Image: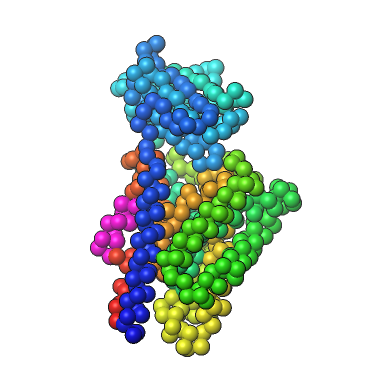
Amino acid sequence: MSSMSTMRQNASRLASAVGAFVLAFGVLGLASPAQADVVNPEMPFKISGNVQNKGEPIAGVTINLTGGGGYTATVMTDAEGKFTAGVPEKEADYSVAVDESTLPDGIAVIDNPATEFVEANVQTVTVGPGGRATMNFFIGQGERNVTSMFDQVVQRLISGLNFGLMLALASVGLSLIYGTTGISNFAHAELVTFGAIATLGLIAVMGEGMLWLAIPLAIALSAGFGWGMDAALWAPLRRRGMGLVQLMIVSIGLSLGIRYTYQFFIGGVTENLPGSGAERFNLFGSVSLSIIDIVSMGVSVLLIIVFAWWLSASKIGKATRAISDNPSLAASSGIDVDGVVRIVWIIGSALAGFSGILWAYFRPGIRWDMGGQILLLIFAATTLGGLGTAYGALVGSLIVGILVEGSSLFIPSDLKYVGALVVLIGILLFRPQGILGRKERVG
């Protein structure tokens, strides 16, 4: 009976993980890089432009667009040197950059004295009330401003480390919840979003000057949200003995319900937290960081160290690891499994809420679906490090963060999430349990 029970448990966990990846790859399939002269035509507002050299159009030039709320797009000029990109918001600023490596040899973007540029090949354009904006790039003989490969690599590594630490805070909680309950919780993305939205709401009430208080209060509210979610839904379902696949399906439905509730209350606009536009300063060469980046990485490292101590040295942390290893044996040893699981939900939700605040600065901006945008990467990091292992989630997150940011040096930004998934698949082919995970035993 013990062997059959263990086999059924392992089969359920495997089905849960497979279901998670099927949905994850479905989400990934929705994203594809732009390869035409018009991108995002379904969006209501448009940015158009021309790339010409002495009146002659230049075809096949890559244009990269970025804006608030994490908007990015890549478009190529057509045979007439024209491009058009749909954008989500009007009366908003967008950065439009020419990839000078795609220009013909011997020419470069030159300064236009009538226009203020961040760099010669970058323009900031505002989509006005009419919902459209047009622009022109001035091309001529000249030398291109080139950032050394060393500086680019260092900048990407630092950004990847920052992104990976932010992912780690969310992934550790997800991994602990999976380890103690077996649930592949897709609603974890909404816990990430909740932290950012709670901070935004508290600032609206207390004022921007109270950001230092709004952030810890938002983290506390996130912890309370996780406790309430477990007490009202997950604990009753666990007592009824609901299967892991069914629990995963419930989590998907819960995720969608909470996500669209966010949209109902805050709308589809993108909001920014105070300090999102903090000025960057040069470390050396072309490598730059903002004070927000430094504080984000420092606090993330501190929290991860404190969490590692809690998990390794505290009584509840040891009980958490025991439950992750063998819930039945832990219960027979006198451990209050339900009580520990409740604490895991509280801590995991608090970490997810704080990661949402950091994600709001990294993107930058707060949207109703911002947690869902990184859910795939959270699952990838958790699985890569080893399902159910907190330290594995940390290692997996750092690898995924650096791969995502570093891959943009070699592939279009639209495809940068694919690199992390390719490495994930490659590692799992040779080590299915993940980097720090254990092989499952049957019998």
Residue farthest along the right direction in this orientation = 206
Q: Quadrant of residue 16?
A: bottom left
Task: Tell which of 211 and 233 is nearer to you.
Answer: 233
Residue at 45%, 42% in the rendered image: 287
| Above or below, comparing residue 161 to residue 443 in the picture | above
- In this image, 156 relative to 427: left or right? right
Q: Quadrant of the N terminus?
A: bottom left
Q: What secondary structure predominates along the stretch shown in magenta?
A: helix
Q: Which residues are magenta?
A: 421-431
Residue at 52%, 76% in the rendered image: 239
User: Does the magenta portion include 181?
Assistant: no
**Percent position of residue 367, x then y:** 57, 45
Any part of residue 354 in sight: no
**Percent position of residue 258, x then y:** 57, 54
Q: Quadrant of residue 302?
A: bottom right
| Above or below, comparing residue 252 to residue 66 in the picture | below
Task: Tell which of 145 and 133 is nearer to you.
Answer: 133
Q: Quadrant of residue 79?
A: top left
Task: Tell which of 55 and 373 is nearer to you.
Answer: 373
Residue at 51%, 84% in the rendered image: 335
- In this image, 181 relative to 225: left or right? left
| Above or below, comparing residue 288 to residue 184 in the picture | above
| Above or below, comparing residue 425 to residue 178 in the picture | above
Residue farthest along the left direction in this orientation = 430
- In this image, 299 relative to 439: left or right? right
**Percent position of residue 365, x then y:** 57, 44
Any part of residue 113 in sight: yes
Residue farthest along the top direction in this orientation = 55
Residue at 47%, 19% in the rendered image: 136
> Colour scheme of this structure image?
rainbow
Q: Quadrant of the C terminus?
A: bottom left
**Percent position of residue 39, x then y:** 42, 30
